[in-house]
Image: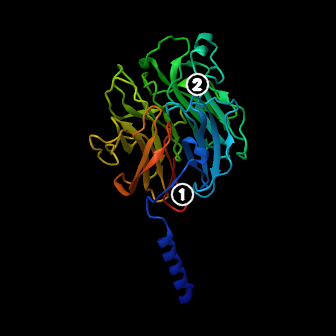
Amino acid sequence: MRRVLPAALVILIASGLAAWYESAPAAGEVVLSRTPNAGLQPEAVVDRSGTVHLVYLSGEPRAADVFYARSADGGRHFTPAIRVNSEAGSAIAMGTIRGAQIAVGPSGRIHVAWNGADRAVPAGSDDKAAAASASPMLYARSNPDGTAFEPQRNLMTRTMNLDGGGSVAADAGGRVYVAWHAHAAGEGAPGEDARRLWIARSEDDGATFGAEAPIAGAAPGVCACCAVRLFAVPDGRLALLYRSAVDKVHRDVRALVSADRGATFRGTLLDEWAVGACPMTSMSAAAGPRLMGAWESEGQVYLGPLDGSTPPVPPSEAAVDAPVRKHPRLAVDRRGTMLLVWTEGTAWGHGGSIAWRAFTPDGKPAGAEGRQDGLPAWSFAAAIPRKDGGFTVLY
């Protein structure tokens, strides 16, 4: 038998829903917030409960420290920060490329990876010459409560000449992946054409890692001082964005996607760029209705699907004299709205501005957009979706 709700209750429910919709943030609404403790290079992820997990750098740019904090209210307030790196000054803020990356595993452990500074623990290769010429790829994981971190570890055992920033990802099965680009130890080939993408895998939530292996499906040739971005897709796939380097001038953005937990990858060319110098670029990825990526090319930032099914789009056409756009970061909220945030006017040792633009789930510019001055040197912004809708941008 159908039960009919009293008219008064129906009116109350309708009024409550109307009030919720009126108070809910508009699609793509952006709230700006400073990184805690004037931190640099914020990187943030949001777990299933809506908790924001943040890492950032602080201290001397050549010998910085990595800090971790969390927020239960969408990035408005953070817990007191704790240091991630067990050896002081073992991270790099200078260059804005080699800082800390973060992932959260299903157990709640926090996984952080970063390029080691010159004073950091030497590279782990058995080849002494290789060890002397390479910076370490460092990793640390938290305890189960996220209140402290285990001693940092160097994951490089077969590689040398680490340069552009590495990345970390954790999937729903308790596996952790760390990727970077380097030369094979002992091969002695110094050029970019000989650089390869490498991946180290853990099957036990970061307790142990196997030796790094070349990424299957990626040909040699990686832009030396550009970062890579590793992303564990909720559907079980593993994606990686990077910039290749062939014949010194062909520096194209490529996507690699794995359906077998990083054993093999299938590649897609996303964007071509002919430039005879390393542009020191970084990238981002996020999953909504489609798996999307963000990258920079020729002073502009772009958003596009990682399968290359539609052409990438910029947030807006930049004027000829517009400041250079760099370091795009991408986030997707519960409605599927995407927010792209990037830097403008930054240079070596100089800060600039951040700017942002919202996109519809099908990738069309729409909704919120804006610009904010005051970005410190060696930094960029992070975008995080909030549980109540909209985004918080940390800078």
Q: Position of residue 381 (x, y in %)?
A: 49, 45
Numbered-mark total: 2
Q: Position of residue 273 (x, y in %)?
A: 32, 31
**Could you tell which of marks 1 and 2 lies nearer the N-terminus?**
2
Q: Nearer the viewer, residue 114 or 212?
A: 114
Identify the residue at image location x=68%, y=30%.
Answer: 88
Q: Nearer the viewer, residue 4 or 305?
A: 305
Q: Specify whether 86 is left or right of 12.
A: right
Closer to viewer: mark 1 or mark 2: 1
Q: Position of residue 362 (x, y in %)?
A: 37, 53
Q: Nearer the viewer, residue 386 or 325?
A: 325
How is this picture coloured?
rainbow
Instruction: Give the quarter of the image for residue 204.
Output: top right
Q: Residue furthest left?
A: 320
Q: Residue furthest bottom?
A: 7
Question: Pointer 2: residues within 10 angstroms few (<14), some, or many (20+)?
Answer: many
Q: Amino acid at mark 1?
A: Arg
The residue indicated by pointer 2 is 212
Say which mark, if any, is on residue 314.
none
Mark 1–mark 2 contact, CB under 8 Å?
A: no
Q: Nearer the viewer, residue 205 or 344?
A: 344
Q: Amino acid at mark 2?
A: Glu
Instruction: Please determine whether, in this image, residue 29 is positioned above or below residue 196.
Output: below
Q: Position of residue 258 (x, y in %)?
A: 49, 36
The residue indicated by pointer 1 is 386
Instruction: Please determine whether, in this image, residue 26 is positioned above or below residue 209.
Output: below
Question: Pointer 1: residues within 10 angstroms few (<14), some, or many (20+)?
Answer: many
- Note whether residue 78 is visible: yes
Identify the residue at image location x=63%, y=56%.
Answer: 72
Q: Secondary structure at mark 2?
A: loop
Identify the residue at image location x=49%, y=67%.
Answer: 24
Instruction: Give the quarter of the image for residue 56.
Output: top right
